């Protein structure tokens, strides 16, 4: 039970949702947008967050889109991880989100919530960071389309009152060769020591990781695809370049995380070399 009172709004259009937020803000109220609510509810119960109003986005058609249209795979921000995985238009994303939490939580957790939630790992971002992906965002000027990596820096960098409407992934990217690895300390379903998503886009290998530091980050693409470096050289250079990102916590020390990343990179590069994607 949430131990404080708040107002609830369920607008049926992007414009009404945006106007509702602005109107409430002008009255010095603290509104929050609401998708699946997994974090909002649990944090509000212990008063880690407080708000005066909730604006539920699930009645907005564009926030519930899940289709391939006009050359893009379009996912509304209010779509659950379960629905996205079962639709399976982007197998790398499907495999990634299936490893986030347990199935019960996946049924409620939305893609928008994972990208903008308080839990630092934000694993659903990994395939989006390495694909030709853009975001539809509701702003004061209406809908804007913004490249994913321009708006996402460990978390969505949204202006006050703006909200994510949908994610668009270029259809040509959906069936690229890919790899996903998640290493945890104990259980299969757990926060990652390191989670990595990688894909081969044309002649270019791309990869992103989370769990290694305080936010998801890209593996240096120039090193991954350097023609004259051996696999060992690539790994050493990547570890050196990302060293400042690596953090220790209760799940694993800095040294252990670097060891895990080294092994993941070894397997990744050997796999793509064996299929003629990366040449030693």
Image: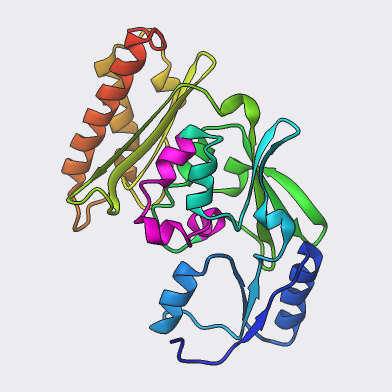
Q: Is residue 278 magenta?
A: no
Vertical comparison of 254 with 14: above or below: above
Residue drawn at 61 percent across, 48 percent down: 151
Vertical comparison of 193 with 31: above or below: above
Vertical comparison of 211 with 280: above or below: below
The quarter holding residue 267 reads top left
Could you say which is closer to the camera, residue 76 or residue 153? 76
Could you say which is closer to the camera, residue 145 or residue 90? 90
Number of marks in the image?
A: 0
Q: In which quarter of the image is the N terminus?
A: bottom left
Residue drawn at 34 percent across, 56 percent down: 102
Residue drawn at 42 percent across, 11 percent down: 277
Asked whether the viewer can see residue 179, the reply is yes
Question: Residue 231's x, y, as percent?
Answer: 28, 15
From which residue to which does the magenta span run?
A: 92-116
Q: In the rendered view, how is the structure colored? A: rainbow
Q: Does the magenta stretch include residue 97?
A: yes
Question: Residue 263's x, y, as percent?
Answer: 22, 29
Q: In this view, does 196 lie to the left or right of 233?
A: right
Q: In this view, does 37 lie to the left or right of 140?
A: left
Q: In this view, does 130 lie to the left or right of 9?
A: left
Residue at the outermost front position: 86
Question: Residue 149's x, y, as percent?
Answer: 57, 41
Question: Residue 134's x, y, as percent?
Answer: 65, 41
Magenta segment, principal secondary structure?
helix
Q: In which quarter of the image is the C terminus?
A: top left
Vertical comparison of 112 with 224: above or below: below
Asked whether the viewer can see residue 154, the reply is no
């Amino acid at each position: 039970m949430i131990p404080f009172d708040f107002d609830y709004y369920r607008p049926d259009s992007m414009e009404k949702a945006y106007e509702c937020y602005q109107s409430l803000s002008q009255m010095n109220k603290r509104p929050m947008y609401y998708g699946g609510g997994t974090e909002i509810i649990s944090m509000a119960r212990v008063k880690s967050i407080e708000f005066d109003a909730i604006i539920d986005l699930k009645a907005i058609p564009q926030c519930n889109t899940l289709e391939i249209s006009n050359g893009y795979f379009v996912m509304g921000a209010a779509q659950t991880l379960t629905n996205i995985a079962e639709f399976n238009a982007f197998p790398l994303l499907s495999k990634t989100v299936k490893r986030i939490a347990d199935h019960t939580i996946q049924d409620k957790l939305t893609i928008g919530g994972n990208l903008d939630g308080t839990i630092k790992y934000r694993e659903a971002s990994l395939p989006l960071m390495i694909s030709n992906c853009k975001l539809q965002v509701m702003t004061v000027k209406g809908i804007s389309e913004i490249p994913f990596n321009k708006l996402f820096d460990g978390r969505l960098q949204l202006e006050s009152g703006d909200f994510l409407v949908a994610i668009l992934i270029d259809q040509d990217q959906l069936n690229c060769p890919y790899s996903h690895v998640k290493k945890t300390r104990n259980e299969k379903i757990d926060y990652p020591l390191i989670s990595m998503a990688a894909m081969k886009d044309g002649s270019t290998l791309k990869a992103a990781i989370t769990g290694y530091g305080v936010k998801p980050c890209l593996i240096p693409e120039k090193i991954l695809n350097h023609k004259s470096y051996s696999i060992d050289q690539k790994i050493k250079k990547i570890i050196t370049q990302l060293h400042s990102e690596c953090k220790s916590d209760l799940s694993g020390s800095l040294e252990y995380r670097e060891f895990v990343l080294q092994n993941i990179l070894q397997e990744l590069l050997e796999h793509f070399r064996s299929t003629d994607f990366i040449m030693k």
